[in-house]
Amino acid sequence: MNPTFRAARGIGGEYTPPPDKSITHRALMLAAIGSGTSTVVDPLATGDCVSTRRCIEALGCSVEDADCAVRLKGAGLRGFTEPKRLLDAENSGTTTRLLSGLLAGLPLFAVLTGDQSLLGRPMARIVQPLRQMGARIEGRDEGRYAPLCFLPGSGELAPLSYRLPVPSAQVKSCLLLAALRAGGDSCISGKTHSRDHTERMLVALGVKVESGPDGILLHPPRELPAFEAEVPGDPSSASFFIAASLISGRKLVVRRCSINPSRNGFLNVVRRMGARVETRQETISLGEPAGSIEVKEGSLTGARIGAEEVPELIDEIPLLAVLGLFCRGVTEVRGAEELRFKESDRLTMISRLVEGLGGRVEIFDDGFALEGPQKLRAGVIDPSGDHRIAMAAAVAAAGIAEGVRVQGFECAAVSYPDFARDFAALGGEVV
């Protein structure tokens, strides 16, 4: 699938993004360890989230589809059964890291693996603290990489006191999930400033989680209750069309979208660039606020993004590179070395994307810098299987009259299978 994206009339209008991937992962996993039957309404049912569903089913959880929802019969905090096959997370780092927290120390044997890309992503950052809690985990290169082998434990872990060396929502969530089965209170400190979906959901389920300047303190519960929750739209998916509308100079209204403050990093940056953005909360479910986002065009200038901002917009940084090509002045990102360990080395891929469109960018070990606006041309971009690079390349077509061809665009289905449909519905053309 090698479509060409064009947007002669620009991108704008009214739009509802697909369900949030991060929230879907966590809702499925919390339902899997709950006591009773939970209902997750409108989960993302593609790519990485399918990997999570298959893994928890292999661990003995019953999952049934019901209208626009799934019902899950939870196994309880210690009730997973030993899987009869490998747990294949495919390309999902979230599945791998969060599920490791649920598996650590359980009285079962399990092997968690994935595709070639996932096998190259760092896992020592979760394996080391889980071992401190008493989990017996083996892995390739002494546990630095998957496959990860979980050896049987007692079902209870030691309390954890750990300082996060990097801001990572996946690592933080893994340790919080493991702490649910600890024999006492656990404290996670250090660089905890990242997406807070796990904390919000646990608090909504009655778990005592205290967040403060000294870190996050979790008091383990006896059990987690069953629940019903609705998954809001994904702001990371919406950001692609927000950027396309800004490049186009057209208004966009996003409906039923997560407006969790820890996910507003991209909106904060585009406001700084000169966009006029308004959000309005309309609902809240399992601790997650949702509502509408209205974006109006403005005169855009470049922005500088420092390390303290990166955790709240890590997935949108390739998109900011594309947006920066159409802004006046310098756009610079630093402190984003984590991008080297995503589905691809995204800093290298940003360079290939920009240069493939005739642009110029300087790449650093931890970020990039470019000056706009740049004179770009039609190009052919190979995202090397990275869904966010593929969609960022398509967004560039909003400012390139001849369009952009994206090779292997089917990789976008990992998080956004209907991207091409929505691009066309908002005024673009896909041929």
Image (cartoon, rainbow, N blue to C red):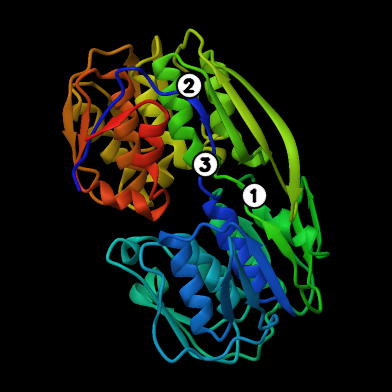
Q: Amino acid at mark 3?
A: Pro
Q: Amino acid at mark 1?
A: Thr
Q: Which residue is mark 1?
A: 192
Mark 3 residue element = loop
Which percent across, then down, holds residue 341?
37, 52
Q: Residue at x 53, y 13 (%)?
A: 274
* Discs 2, 3 touching: Cβ within 8 Å: no
Answer left or right for 427 relative to 379.
right
Is 262 drawn above or below residue 113 in the view shown? above
Q: Is residue 284 above or below residue 392?
A: below
The C terminus is located in which quarter?
top left
At label 2, the amino acid type is Arg
**Residue under the point 65% across and 50% down:** 190
Cα–Cα gap, marks 2 and 1: 22 Å
Which of the pair 70/47 is nearer the observer? 70
Quick one: SS at disc 2?
strand
Q: Earlier in the sequence, mark 3 or mark 1?
A: 3
The residue indicated by pointer 3 is 17
Q: Is residue 175 visible?
A: yes
Q: Residue 84, image x and y in percent?
A: 43, 92
Work out whether 363 lies above or below 289.
above
Residue 335, given in percent of the width and then of the height, sits at: 46, 36
Horizontal arrangement in the rendering, residue 141 relative to residue 218 (left or right): left
Give the numbered dot on residue 304. Answer: 2
At 54% from the left and 44% from the top, the residue drawn is 234
